[in-house]
Image: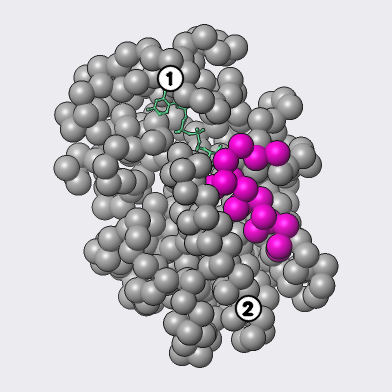
Amino acid sequence: MKILVTGGLGFIGSHTCVELLENGHEVVVVDNLNNSKKDVLDKIKKITGSDKIKLYVEDVKNIKALDNIFKENNIECVIHFAGYKAVGESVKNPIMYYENNIVSTINLLNVMKKYNVKKIIFSSTATVYGEPKSCPVSENFSTGNTTNPYATTKYMIERILDDLYKSDNEWSIAILRYFNPIGAHKSGLIGENPNGIPNNLMPYILKVAAGELPKLNIFGNDYNTHDGTGVRDYIHVVDLAKGHVKAIEKISSENGVKVYNLGTGIGYSVLDIVNTFIEKNKVELPYEITDRRPGDVDEVFSNPTKAKNELGWEAKLSIDDMCVDSWNFKKNNI
Ligand code: UFG
């Protein structure tokens, strides 16, 4: 199948392109390089040995560019990753988030409609659940009580996709709610390496381990968890990427809006991650316990059984793999 991947050079996008190519799909990437680098394309080709991937350096907000991509390629399905994703930044600049994430999606859906392409996988997030009432979190838990504009954009897009299907039952839509993706491809060629000071745990750990930042701040050790630090459902990005290949099979066989959690179902604390990282990689990782980060909750982990039952997908890689592969990528890219 010929698949358009928006944001295909980003962290999750690039790993998904690898899995798509390895499963015989053809890939067209549209990416504005806002949070990615052009050389990722060569790395994807190197890993897969495939050149069935083409890049357009364009912004998904640019409807003319999108139209041209659909005109030039026989796109059959879209995976929509492109979007801003920093929680703190979205609180400071909500208009920028609503404009970028919502306008790009509306443009994309309009062009898809024009070219009669009605299969889409949307990259959503566990933060659409807000502060979940209990764990594990299932797909039927209430959504929308979001705590920041970034999460609200994801929630709004989920609603738009729902309404779209209600208006036209020929659409086939999968909404994938990611938990906490970390890790990197085994090759060490692609991974997550944000510029500046990272917000998320693993990119921060990598910069501390590499000596680029002095120490990790662990945001609170008085949470109601086994060691007091926050618990999350970390998932290896390669497992996550494979979930997209399964979702394509699903939406190719039936119409509708399907929602799946992509997580492992296991919660690890910040200290579990830190200690595993130190032990498996034999590196030093200075840290300090600091105040809680506003908005953080005790624990969030998924119930992943719907994806297992309906997609035949489950996460296979362990916390050890996540820590070792993350560090392997960082070491190769210092
Ligand atoms: N943490 C630290 N120190 C840091 C960074 C994080 O102690 O420097 C802790 C947090 O307090 C939390 C855990 O590590 O307990 C994970 O924090 P992340 O920022 O890595 O991830 P979040 O769970 O807060 O949020 C992430 C993404 C969102 C996504 C969400 C899905 O940032 O985009 O997971 O649940 F939507």
According to the image, label 2 marks what residue? Answer: 110
Q: Crowdedness of circle 2 by 10 Å Cα count: few (<14), some, many (20+)?
A: some
Give the residues in magenta: 145-161
C-alpha distance separating marks 1 and 2: 42 Å
- Image point 57% across, 46% down: which residue? 149
Colouring: one colour
Mark 2: amino acid: Asn
- Tally the marks: 2
Q: Residue 296's mark?
A: none
Q: Secondary structure at mark 1?
A: strand
In-image side of 164 versus 101 (left or right) = right
- Image point 73% across, 42% down: which residue? 143
What percent of the width, then of the height, locates residue 139? 73, 42
Above or below, comparing residue 166 to residue 277 in the picture: below
What percent of the width, then of the height, locates residue 272? 43, 19
CB contact under 8 Å: marks 1 and 2: no
Whether residue 236 is visible here, answered yes or no, is no
Rendered-image quadrant of the N terminus: bottom right
Q: Nearer the viewer, residue 133 or 41?
A: 133
Callout 1: CB less than 8 Å from ligand 1: yes
In-image side of 28 versus 138 (left or right) = left
Q: Is residue 74 magenta?
A: no
Magenta segment, principal secondary structure? helix
According to the image, label 1 marks what residue? Answer: 219
Q: Nearer the viewer, residue 189 or 82?
A: 82
Above or below, comparing residue 180 to residue 43 in the picture: above
Above or below, comparing residue 161 to residue 137 in the picture: below
- Image point 66% across, 50% down: which residue? 155
